[in-house]
């Protein structure tokens, strides 16, 4: 049995010295010194030895066990030190290397121009009002003097959730909500998203943005409307900008008009940008219909007002000569980084 113990010692020492990883040492410890290890199993056979040999064999076995445990600990310390050094080398940071350049985002052109428009009207004494994008039929149509048989109520134009709930097709419902809660004088703009059932192409989208304005007070006239919008255009496009008003019809204003701005490219001569007309339509406007004022409990005999609405995407497209509305929503950095 002494020969077997010495043989186990020699074999174990060789294997310990050849180990390169901590898990290999752990496996060796179990293999030789565990409860079912080679040395442990051999010692269980000591009962078969003559009494005079048991003491000598037991002393040798304890000596070999202690020696192997000591070798294992020493080797384990060496391997851990080597692994730590390798880890530090692999994780070393060269502080002299140039840093990584992070791409900084840009303000979206729609957000950029919307903020500019908001600032222009705030400078003229307007405040910003917001409302829900999911509206009732009453606020989106009835309160705005849009009858039941009006084409705007057709399901081809409006996203209906049920017979009474829909996605707002304009931000005009915000004006109604403000007039219900606030007594004149009122001077607000209501920017936000609106929804219409349009197919996506270069000039149409089912989701787009509007900025509408409302002024209600005593002695408000069409000249106030024209003066406000002319000043707005000059602030937005430059002092040399010219506008003109054309008669139109909206159910919620009377009289109503479309406002055009002189083409920035040809200065009224006619070109491909303005389709040869020399003028570009940018918004609709008019004096608030007396029926709308009455619906909001405002006496049209005492108060009058004007309203206007413009499509943000159209303004931005004209501003930057963009010919495809879809570019605003595709998140293409090649396009957005230009702004």
Image (tube, rainbow, N blue to C red):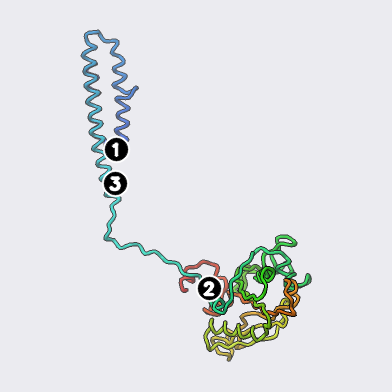
Could you tell me residue 186's position as x and y percent? 64, 75
- Residue at x 30% of width, y 50% of height: 91
Could you tell me residue 333's position as x and y percent? 47, 68
Could you tell me how many numbered marks the image carries? 3
Which residue does the numbered mark 3 point to in the structure image? 87
Res. 74 in view: yes
Closest to the observer, 80 or 254: 254
Separation of marks 1 and 2 at Cα, in angstroms: 63 Å
Per the image, label 3 sits on a secondary structure element best described as helix
Which residue does the numbered mark 2 point to in the structure image? 115
- Residue at x 63% of width, y 88% of height: 244
Q: Residue furthest top?
A: 51
Which residue does the numbered mark 1 point to in the structure image? 21
Q: Earlier in the sequence, mark 1 or mark 3?
A: 1
**Closer to us: mark 2 or mark 3?**
2
Could you tell me residue 93's position as x and y percent? 29, 55
């Amino acid at each position: 049995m002494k020969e077997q113990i010495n043989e186990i010692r020699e074999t174990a020492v060789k294997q310990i010295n050849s180990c390169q990883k901590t898990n290999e040492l752990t496996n060796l410890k179990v293999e030789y010194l565990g409860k079912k290890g080679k040395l442990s199993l051999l010692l269980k056979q000591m009962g078969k030895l003559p009494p005079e040999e048991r003491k000598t064999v037991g002393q040798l076995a304890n000596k070999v066990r202690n020696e192997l445990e000591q070798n294992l600990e020493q080797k384990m310390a060496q391997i851990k030190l080597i692994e730590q050094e390798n880890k530090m080398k692999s994780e070393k940071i060269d502080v002299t290397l140039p840093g990584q350049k992070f791409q900084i985002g840009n303000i979206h052109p729609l957000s950029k121009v919307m903020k500019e428009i908001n600032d222009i009207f705030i400078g003229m004494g307007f405040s910003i009002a917001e409302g829900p994008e999911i509206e009732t039929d009453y606020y989106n149509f009835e309160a705005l003097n849009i009858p039941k048989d009006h084409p705007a109520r057709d399901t081809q134009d409006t996203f209906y959730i049920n017979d009474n709930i829909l996605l707002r097709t304009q931000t005009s419902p915000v004006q109604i909500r403000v007039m219900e809660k606030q007594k004149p004088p009122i001077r607000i703009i209501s920017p936000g998203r609106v929804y219409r059932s349009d197919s996506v192409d270069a000039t149409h989208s089912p989701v787009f943005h509007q900025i509408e304005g409302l002024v209600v007070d005593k002695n408000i006239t069409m000249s106030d409307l024209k003066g406000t919008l002319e000043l707005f255009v000059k602030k937005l496009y430059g002092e040399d900008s010219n506008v003109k008003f054309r008669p139109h019809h909206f159910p919620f204003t009377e009289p109503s008009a479309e406002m055009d701005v002189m083409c920035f490219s040809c200065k009224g001569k006619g070109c491909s940008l303005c389709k040869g007309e020399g003028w570009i339509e940018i918004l609709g406007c008019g004096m608030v219909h007396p029926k709308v004022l009455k619906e909001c409990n405002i006496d049209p005999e005492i108060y009058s007002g004007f309203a206007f609405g413009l499509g943000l995407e159209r303004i931005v497209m004209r501003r930057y000569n963009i010919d495809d509305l879809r570019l605003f929503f595709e998140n293409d950095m090649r396009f957005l980084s230009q702004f």
